[in-house]
Amino acid sequence: MSPPHGEFASRDYLRGLIDADGSVGFTRRGMPFISLSTSSTAIGTYMRSDAQSARWSDAQ
């Protein structure tokens, strides 16, 4: 499995991945977290890259 090729709505795709194979919550210390279980290297790479770009765009 791999991310779609061509244009797609990244937020909607991410939401679908987490809804299917992940979870969102808070740690005991109140820190938010997102987890995803996948055996797909392509999906893992996409998630890391999307998280990095989201972190930078939110900081600016």
Image (cartoon, rainbow, N blue to C red):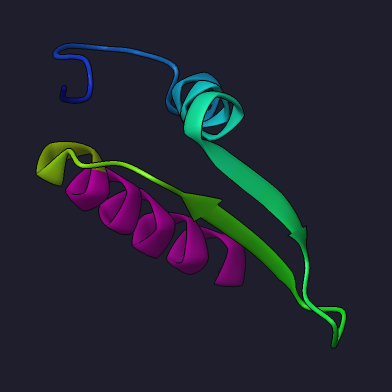
Q: Quadrant of residue 58?
A: bottom right
Q: Residue furthest bottom?
A: 29
The verdict on residue 11 being magenta is no
Q: Is residue 22 above or below residue 33?
A: above
Question: Quick check: 55 left or right of 24?
Answer: left
* Residue 29 picture quarter: bottom right
Q: Which residue is drawn at 40% across and 46% down?
A: 37
* Up/down of 29 relative to 18, above or below: below
Q: Where is residue 27 in the image (x, y as percent from the top left)?
A: 78, 76
Residue at 70% across, 50% down: 24
Please tell me which residue is depicted at 20% across the width and 42% down the height of the picture: 39
Residue at 21% x, 15% y is 4
Residue 14 rendering spot, x and y as whole percentages? 48, 31
- Establish if 27 lies above or below 6: below
Q: Is the magenta stretch mostly helix, strand or loop?
A: helix
Question: In x, y percent, where is residue 5?
Answer: 14, 14
**Number of numbered discs overlaid on the protein picture:** 0
Res 28 → quadrant: bottom right
Left-right relation of 12 to 45: right
The percent position of residue 21, horizontal first and vertical second, equals: 49, 33
Residue 58 inside the magenta-drawn segment: yes
Quarter of the picture containing the C terminus is bottom right
On-image quarter of the N terminus: top left
- Taking depth in this image into account, of 10 and 56 the one nearest to the observer is 10
Q: Describe residue 44's horizontal placement relative to residue 13 as left or right.
A: left
Which region shows up in magenta? 44-60
